[in-house]
Amino acid sequence: MLNQCILVGRVVQIKEENKTTILTLRIARNYKDPDTEEYEVDNLDVQLSEHLSATAKEYLSEESTVGVKARIASEKRIVANDEITLHTIIAEKLTFINTKKSEN
């Protein structure tokens, strides 16, 4: 069994949540919506480990293009007496395709 996915997208934001860094990527779908004839996008949150977090903060900014090799983790929770499954995308490797970090 293999639990890996590859995502390529533009950085929407980099945020800190409870000692965890979350990278939000805007990823265009490869097909048009039949009703609007426009390409839709998905915004996906990717959780970064500590070592990837430091690198991302140093080299990435909004609108940077990045490739992410990741795995998907799932967790079951009870919410309002219903069991739900949450999925988290956890980055294992970042590939910088086009960084737009401003030089100050």
Image: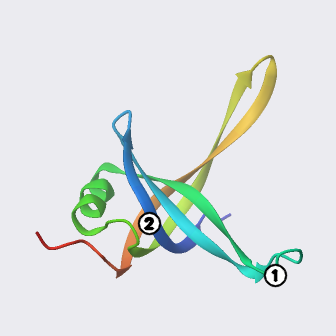
Picture coordinates of residue 43, whole percent (x, y):
59, 60
Q: Quadrant of residue 94?
A: bottom left
Residue at the far right: name it: 35
Q: Quadrant of residue 40?
A: bottom right
Q: Secondary structure at mark 1?
A: loop
Quarter of the picture containing the C terminus is bottom left
> What residue do we see at 24% from left, 56% from top?
54
Position of residue 84 in the picture relative to residue 97 (left or right) = right
> What residue do we see at 38% from left, 47% from top?
15
- Where is mark 1, residue-wise? 37
Position of residue 69 in the picture relative to residue 40 (left or right) = left
In the figure, 85 relative to 99: above or below?
Answer: above
| Nearest to viewer (mark 2 / mark 1) | 1
Residue 92 vs residue 21, the one in the foreground = 21
- Where is mark 2, residue-wise? 11
In the figure, 97 relative to 22: above or below?
Answer: below
Neighbours of disc 1 within 10 Å: few (<14), some (14-19), many (20+): few
